[in-house]
């Protein structure tokens, strides 16, 4: 299933993320994901595994236009020349002439360079090196500034989002601006017992699916773009097999009720890495 972005391009709503996938294992793991059927891969320069992603793409023989590849500009590369150089390096590592989506990884408001960087992203898009451009970990105030100072509204904002940290107000803001929401840590990164919480466990039991499948379905039914990560081919297949059932409104509402500010990652307003 595809989502149409504000620039008219489409993105597969369900993809595969490779945060913390060992660079030495990335080619095998992404090859597995492509064989399972994933066509949307989410990586980043800082993950150190773009080379492995590129090798898996090349080995797959899948036509380039059938794939959707995202990478991200790391914080220390925010700026003008550094951002152009970072894009070139990511493309070289991936072995691609363009990515489908390029994201500013974190706003790092303390650096005060994300608007300058966004102007580079606009040029990268014009030149065809990044088909769509977006941001990650941006809050309302960062986006308000960025939108006021530029001519392209980001296509997506990739934010921490899982039932315990559901980001309702930010999701509403993004919808109002026509910016698609992407979830990172969609399963809570395994950092709290999401799968044992009764709304998730009960919904899974009712549909004869696993708790992970129920949570992925919750994201999809909210219109969120999602790319769970796993090294296991079995779980890749499990996480991809989520189109044969539908959560009821009551099940969705019960999972919505798990929202309790359970942030598992860094706060974009204060992060300084
Ligand atoms: P996630 O929520 O996808 O959780 C991954 C964990 O869940 C792993 O420990 C995995 O073993 C487990 N898991 C996966 N499938 C399972 C299943 N079926 N049953 C049981 N356990 C299962 O966390 P994530 O990897 O951090 O997030 C997904 C992707 O989001 C990343 O790979 C990356 O591409 C992206 N990401 C982006 C940012 C950002 O700042 N933009 C930050 C973190 C992650």
Image (cartoon, helix red, strand yellow):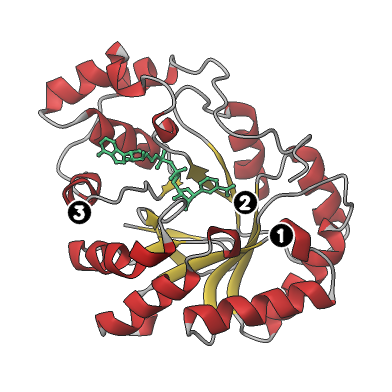
Q: CA distance from mark 3 to mark 1?
A: 36 Å
The residue under label 2 is 178
Q: Does label 2 or label 3 sit earlier along the sequence?
A: 2
Q: Is residue 224 left or right of residue 193?
A: right
Look at 33% across and 75% down and name the residue there. 56
- Disc 2, SS: loop
Q: Residue reaching furthest left?
A: 208
Give the answer, above or below, for where 255 lies relative to 272: above
Residue 52 drawn at (x, y percent): 40, 72
The residue under label 1 is 153
Indicate the quadrant of ligand 1 in the picture.
Answer: top left
Q: Does label 3 or label 1 sit earlier along the sequence?
A: 1
Look at 82% across and 57% down and name the residue there. 114
Q: Residue reaching furthest front?
A: 24
Q: CA distance from mark 2 to mark 3?
A: 35 Å
Look at 58% across and 29% down and name the residue there. 167
Q: Is residue 207 left or right of residue 170?
A: left
What is the quadrant of the N terminus in the image? bottom left
Give the answer, above or below, for where 238 lies relative to 131: above
Q: CA distance from mark 1 to mark 2?
A: 8 Å
Q: Residues within 10 Å of mark 3 (few under 14, many from 20)?
A: some
Q: Residues within 10 Å of mark 2 (few under 14, many from 20)?
A: some
Residue 50 drawn at (x, y percent): 49, 70
- Disc 1, SS: loop
- Is residue 62 among what the camera can see? no
Q: Does label 1 or label 2 sit earlier along the sequence?
A: 1
- Residue 233 is labelled as 3
Q: Residues within 10 Å of mark 1 (few under 14, many from 20)?
A: many
Residue 177 drawn at (x, y percent): 67, 48
Image depth: mark 2 or mark 3 in front: 3
Rendering quarter of residue 220: top left
Q: Are marks 1 and 2 in contact (CB under 8 Å)?
A: yes
């Amino acid at each position: 299933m595809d989502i149409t972005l504000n620039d008219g391009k489409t993105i597969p709503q369900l993809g595969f993320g490779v945060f913390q996938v060992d660079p030495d294992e990335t080619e095998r793991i992404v090859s597995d994901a492509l064989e399972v059927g994933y066509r949307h891969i989410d990586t980043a320069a800082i993950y150190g595994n773009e080379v492995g992603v590129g090798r898996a793409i090349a080995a797959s023989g899948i036509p380039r236009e059938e794939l959707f590849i995202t990478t991200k500009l790391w914080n220390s590369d925010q700026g003008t020349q550094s951002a152009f150089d970072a894009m070139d390096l990511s493309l070289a590592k991936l072995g691609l002439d363009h990515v489908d989506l390029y994201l500013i990884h974190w706003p790092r408001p303390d650096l005060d360079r994300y608007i300058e960087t966004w102007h580079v992203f606009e040029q990268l898009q014009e030149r065809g090196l990044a088909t769509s451009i977006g941001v990650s970990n941006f809050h309302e105030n960062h986006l308000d500034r960025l939108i006021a100072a530029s001519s392209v509204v980001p296509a997506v904002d990739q934010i921490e989002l899982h039932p315990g940290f559901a980001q309702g107000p930010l999701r509403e803001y993004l919808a109002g601006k026509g910016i698609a929401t992407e979830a990172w840590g969609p399963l809570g990164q395994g950092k709290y017992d999401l799968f044992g919480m009764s709304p998730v466990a009960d919904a899974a039991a009712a549909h004869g699916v696993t708790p992970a499948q129920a949570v992925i379905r919750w994201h999809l039914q909210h219109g969120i773009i999602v790319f769970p990560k796993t090294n296991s081919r079995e779980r890749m297949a499990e996480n991809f097999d989520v189109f044969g059932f539908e959560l009821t409104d009551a099940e969705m509402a019960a999972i919505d009720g798990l929202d309790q500010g359970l942030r598992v990652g860094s706060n974009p307003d204060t992060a300084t890495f």
